[in-house]
Image: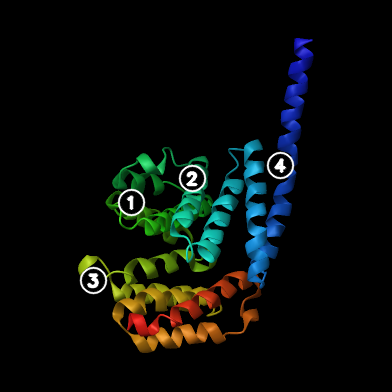
Amino acid sequence: MIIGLCTLALGACSMGQMVARSSLPILESGNVAMNQETDLELARAAIPANLKLVEGLIQELPDNADLRIQAAQGFYGYAYGFVEDEDNKRASALYRRGWEHARQALQVSGLREDVSVLSADELKRQSGELGRGSVPALFWTASCWAKWIDMNRNDPARIADMGKVAALMERVLALDENYYHGGAHLFFGVYYGARPPMLGGDFERSAKHFEKARTITHGKLLLVDLLQAEYLAHQQLDRKQFHERLTAVVNAPLNIYPEMALANAIAQQKAGKLLAKEEEWF
């Protein structure tokens, strides 16, 4: 009887894992469809259910890096696109949830220790041993971590971790600068453009990274101009550049980059909000 019960339990466990694994291609197709969505309200309503589905599958396959990365990407996108402009505290919690998933994916991908306990030097050394297959985990760990820090910029302990985030993104650049539409270049465009030179900013390096991201995406990803206006042009007090880039984003055809239509729709919405701040900022 005991042997029979154990067999049933193992069978149930295996069945759940089998179903979870078989769902991975469907999830990937769902991500493609979501990225092509142009109706922001539809996307906003649909994403939370998708996230809970992914987290349910993670319960069955906790060491599956692909699922963890999908969760991290989903929490990042939802927080950035639909939450952070309205509720900083909630966005912070969502970015942290994404970071928790991504950092576990990073350990599955080969990092020997949790990023949160490593010194900056040790993190740079260990991440330097990772190969190209670790790029998604590196990128989403750094992305979610950076946004969580940004939501808590008054906390010195969080700001001190930005060096670790930059080390992870440097490794992404070294391994695959084209990953996720040149996302690492976008990161460094903001990283160097959001601060004055006396605090570590570097406007020339920022502009070069933005231009590289623009080249990689053939000028079709509107987030590039949005972020360059929001951070670099704003920091330079360049009102003309700020206005022209954001106006171009708002007026761009929505079908300019079909595979990233949702990101472009979000960029257009955010550009409109930033233009409304032009008089206040300049």
Mark 1 to mark 2 CA distance (whole Å): 15 Å
Can residue 54 be seen from the camera position used here?
A: yes
SS at mark 4 in the image: helix
Tag 3 residue: 197
Amino acid type, residue under disc 1 in the picture: Arg
Amino acid type, residue under disc 3 in the picture: Pro
Residue 155 vertical position relative to residue 265 in the rendered view, above or below: above
How far across and down, in percent of the image, does residue 163 sit?
Answer: 31, 54
Mark 4 to mark 1 CA distance (whole Å): 35 Å
Q: Is residue 54 left or right of residue 205?
A: right
Amino acid type, residue under disc 2 in the picture: Glu
Say few, some or many: other residues with alpha carbon within 10 Å of mark 1 (under 14 / 14 to 19 / 20 or more): some
Determine contact: label 1, label 3, CB under 8 Å: no
How far across and down, in percent of the image, does residue 193 sit?
Answer: 33, 72
Tag 1 residue: 158
Q: Earlier in the sequence, mark 2 or mark 4?
A: 4
In this view, the residue in front, 139 or 125, is 139
Q: Earlier in the sequence, mark 1 or mark 3?
A: 1
Tag 4 residue: 20
Q: Earlier in the sequence, mark 4 or mark 1?
A: 4
Mark 3 to mark 4 CA distance (whole Å): 49 Å
Question: Closer to the camera: disc 2 or disc 3?
Answer: 2
Q: Residue at x 27, y 69 (%)?
A: 201
